[in-house]
Structures are given as C-alpha cells and as structure tokens.
C-alpha cells in the first residue's frame, strides 16, 4: 500500500493579535513557503493497533502507547480515532516533518496537528471535512496555548486569508490586489501561554486602559480589511505602524523586535510590526516586490535568523 501523506501551511497574523482573545477581530493569512507534513505507511506485518511515530525534527521515535497521555501527537491521533469511532486501527507508521520554525508565531503546532489529522483520517478511509479538522486541531491547540483564540487552526485548515472573531463563523474576504509581506524571525522563542497570561494579568490590573487598546486594535483590523478588499495598499503600511505602537503598550514587544522593525522601515518597508504573541518570534513588513530582497538583507544584518518573503493573494 503506498504511503498516504498530507501537508499544512504556516500562518501569519497581519492584524489583531492578543486583542482577538478579547473579542476583537484579527486577520491572518497562510504562508505556503513553509509547511508541516505527515506521511503514513501501513505495517501489515505488525500487530493490529500498533502505531509508530517518527518525528526526526524533534528526535522522537516512539509508539503511540509509549508517549505520555498529554503528548500533543498522542492526543491528536487519539482524538481522530475517537471522532471516527475507530478503536483499533490497522498498524501504521506516522512520519512527521516540518520546515516551519518552532515557537515563532507561524502556527507550527497547529500545522503539524492538521497534517496528522488529515493523514490519519485519509489512511482510515474516512477523510474529515475542513471544519472537523479545524475543531480537532483546536483541541490539541489547547495543550500548547491554554486558551487559544482558534485563529491558528482556522486559517491553516482552510488555507486562505480569514477575518476571524472568536465564537463567530470564519469569514473569508476578497483580496483585490496581491501584496508582499516579509517575515523576519528574531530567533527568540517565547511561550504563547505565558505571553497571553502576561497580557491578561496587565488587563486585570487596568481593564479600562487595556480595553481601550483592544478597541483601537480592533478598529485598525476592520479598516485593514476594507483596505485589502478595495486594493488600497498604500493605507496598510501606516496601519501596521499604528498597530505596533499599540502592541508596545501591551508590553509584548522587545528590543530585538524593535531592531528588526526599525531596520525594515529604514530599508524601505511601507510599515512594520511584530506578529503573533510577541516576546520574540516574528515581525512582518509590507514591501514593494522590487525591494523585498533588500529589506530581507537588512533584516539579516539587524539580527534576523531567517526571513520569509510571501505574497498575500486571492487563492
């Protein structure tokens, strides 16, 4: 039996991080240049129900039952089996790999979960619908992030730009004109759960100020959607800059992020901000395609460990 495989892209948040946890909208887009992959090979000579997992990127080689009960890969596979009402699957080996940087706001955990969910369900002859995939991936996201917004599993599952508000149906929207984003990685890992928890603690200490910040971020996000829908790309750069000021007020920016953001602007970016949880991870810059490479070079010179140039466009 040939191997069955599935892949899932990374994602990047354009606007709305952290505020999305408090009921405001966010815009996120897939990043196809890096992916997570899951491949399954049947093992007809092994005992029924044996599941072996190989994930060389994290030096993991184990059977499913040897993994701790709370391990994300074990939880993901067991949730798929439960959803499909399969108690004892045919024996198989699952190989997981990813080119998505870890803990950098690109949704690496969600992408791995989604690739695994799709590969396992396809191997069992019961491929799941996108919404089911997203719902199952969200369960694993709770292990990583405590109280996740749901944006990672949503945008990665549907692999298209989304306008997202927690508790509401996802909305896709048209992109009139494609635009180029450069992602710069500080190389500094931070915990999403910790960063979200830190913001919550500050919000609890001064709810009026933080609600006002979240309101402002929400307004920028709504305006950004309108600008993207109408192809008014000249408006996006200042919105990125304004959003960054607000994220600094939330206390999630760092000197390293600021250095990359400043370098991108000085190299000709129309606007720049951190993306994701903050405390490290990534920043993004809006670029003209003609100067994207020079901005990337400037980011490396300012300390970025990697950059990704991606085009946001209508799928």
Image: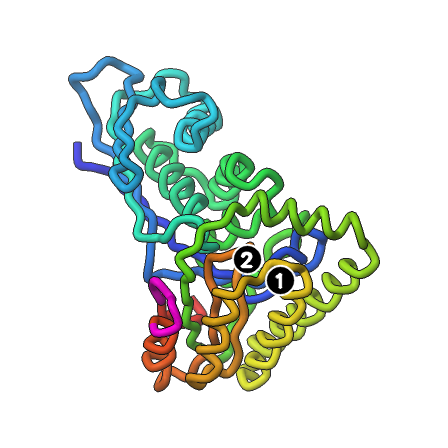
Which of 267/169 is in front?
267
Extreme-top residue of the structure = 47
Tag 2 residue? 278
Q: Position of residue 62 (x, y in %)?
A: 28, 24
Residue 16, located in which quarter of the rendered image? bottom right
Q: Quadrant of the C terminus?
A: bottom left
| Residue range highlighted in magenta | 301-307
Residues at marks 2 and 1, CA–CA distance in whole angstroms: 12 Å
Residue at horizontal 50 percent and vertical 36 percent from the top: 140
**Residue that protrudes farthest toward the right in the picture:** 208
Q: Indicate the position of residue 184 as horizontal and vertical percent values.
A: 41, 67
**Residue beneath the point at 47% across and 74% down:** 285
Relative to 1, residue 308 above or below:
below
Write down the residue under mark 1.
Answer: 16
**Which numbered mark, 2 or 1, is in the foreground of this view?**
2
Disc 2 packing (10 Å; few <14; some 14–19; many ≥20): many
The local secondary structure at tag 1 comes to loop
Tell me which residue sits at (45%, 78%) in the image. Answer: 264
Q: What mark, if any, has residue 2 been given in the picture? A: none
Q: 230 or 100, which lies in front?
A: 100
Query: Mark 1, residues whose alpha carbon is within 10 Å: few (<14), some, or many (≥20)?
Result: many
Image quarter (top left, top right, bottom left or bottom right) of the N terminus: top left
Please tell me whether residue 200 is drawn above or below residue 183 in the rendered image: above
In this view, 48 is above or below 219: above
């Amino acid at each position: 039996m040939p191997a069955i495989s599935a892949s899932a892209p990374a994602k990047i948040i354009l606007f709305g991080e952290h505020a999305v946890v408090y009921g405001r909208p966010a815009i996120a887009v897939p990043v196809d240049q890096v992916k997570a992959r899951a491949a399954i090979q049947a093992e007809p000579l092994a005992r029924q129900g044996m599941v072996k997992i190989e994930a060389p990127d994290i030096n993991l080689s184990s059977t499913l039952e040897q993994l701790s009960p709370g391990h994300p890969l074990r939880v993901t596979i067991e949730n798929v089996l439960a959803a499909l009402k399969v108690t004892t699957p045919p024996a198989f080996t699952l190989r997981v790999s990813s080119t998505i940087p870890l803990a950098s706001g690109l949704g690496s955990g969600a992408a791995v979960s989604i690739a695994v969910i799709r590969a396992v369900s396809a191997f069992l002859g019961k491929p799941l619908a996108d919404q089911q995939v997203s719902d199952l991936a969200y369960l694993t996201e709770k292990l990583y992030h405590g109280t996740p917004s749901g944006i990672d599993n949503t945008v990665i599952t549907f692999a298209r730009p989304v306008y997202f508000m927690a508790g509401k149906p996802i909305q896709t929207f048209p992109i009139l004109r494609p635009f180029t984003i450069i992602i710069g990685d500080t190389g500094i890992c931070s915990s999403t759960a910790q960063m979200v928890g830190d913001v919550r603690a500050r919000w609890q200490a001064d709810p009026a100020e933080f609600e006002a910040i979240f309101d402002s971020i929400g307004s920028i996000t709504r305006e950004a959607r309108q600008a993207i829908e109408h192809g008014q790309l000249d408006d996006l750069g200042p919105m990125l800059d304004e959003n960054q000021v607000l994220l600094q007020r939330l206390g999630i920016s760092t000197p390293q992020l600021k250095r990359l953001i400043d370098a991108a602007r000085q190299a000709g970016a129309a606007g720049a901000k951190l993306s994701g949880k903050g405390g490290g991870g990534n920043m993004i810059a809006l670029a003209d395609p003609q100067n994207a490479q020079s901005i990337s070079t400037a980011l490396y010179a300012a300390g970025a460990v990697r950059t990704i140039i991606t085009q946001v466009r209508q799928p």
